[in-house]
Image (cartoon, rainbow, N blue to C red):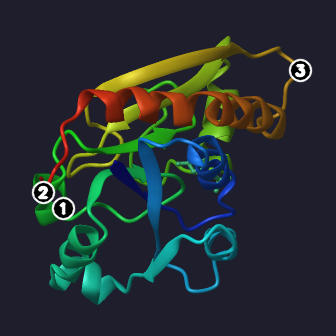
Amino acid sequence: MKNIAIFASGTGSNARKIVEYFKENPNFSVKLLVSNRADAPVLDMATENGIATLILSRKMFYESEELLTALQQHDIDLIALAGFLWLAPPYLVKAYEGRMVNIHPALLPAFGGRGMHGIHVHEAVKKAGVAQSGITIHFVNEKYDSGSILFQASCPIAPEDTAADIARTVLQLEHRHYAPVLEELLINIPKLHS
Ligand code: GRF
């Protein structure tokens, strides 16, 4: 059994899709939901599904390696960021090299970097007048949105589409692709602690 930790601090629609996708899978299991917001709605979803939760403080994340202990306790093989905005600290990047991915709601390397999250991404895409947007699933390194790309999918943008329209279409792409891409990666990585 290989185990997944999801890091999420927003509404958690991607986290929910991932949990649903792996629910009946005998090989892979979502074991832990990590959030930096104690009031994130995604925590309720985790609890309802019997998934352990961990609330991170900045101090714990950046000034200790307590998180690594928790990840080890839950035997976590893969970390999926889904709406988690804190930059990963070096100890985490190192411990989960090739095993930590993020999903970004645009076609990187464009429209990424600090501050490029949520509706800001889609507003920038709209302003640029490009003909398509999409999603990027990439490995996480010590800089925002710049790790190597694992998967991209695109969608067309009509001239009359608003940023909110683009956001909706892109979110559907995220929901369709994130979990299967994670599954493929899980198949290809060995267990971290054997
Ligand atoms: C998604 O758009 C994802 O690309 C980004 O954060 C958003 C999370 O949305 N990293 P949700 O909380 O999963 O609905």
> Where residue 151 sits: x, y (%)?
43, 22
Asked if residue 11 is positioned above or below residue 164 in the image, the reply reads below
Callout 2: SS: helix
Q: Earlier in the sequence, mark 2 or mark 3?
A: 2
> Which residue is labeled 3 in the image?
160
Image height of 144 relative to 146, above or below: below
Q: Residue at x 62, y 65 (%)?
A: 10
**What separation in Å lies between label 2 and label 1 (alpha carbons)?**
5 Å
**In the rendered view, would you say 40 is above or below 3?**
below
Measure the alpha-carbon separation of dots 2 and 3: 45 Å
Q: CA distance from mark 1 to mark 3?
A: 42 Å
Image disc number at residue 95: 2
Q: Is residue 66 visible to the viewer in this orientation of the structure? A: yes
Judge left or right: residue 70 versus residue 182. left
Kind of residue at badge 2:
Ala
Q: Is residue 134 left or right of residue 171?
A: left
- Visible residue check, residue 109: no
Say what amino acid the circle numbered 1 marks: Leu
Question: Counting other residues with Cα less than 10 Å from the Cα at mark 2, is it few (<14), some (14-19), or many (20 or more)?
Answer: few
**Which of marks 3 and 1 precedes in the sequence?**
1
- Residue picked out by circle 1: 92
Q: The residue tagged with tag 3: helix, strand or loop?
A: loop
Picture residue at 63% right of the left edge, 48% below the top? 14
Residue 61 lies, with reference to residue 122, above or below; the image says below
Q: Quadrant of residue 130?
A: top right
Judged by depth in the image, the label closer to the viewer, 1 or 3, is 1
- Amino acid type, label 3: Glu
- Whether label 2 touches label 1, CB < 8 Å: yes
The spot of residue 193 in percent (x, y) is 13, 56
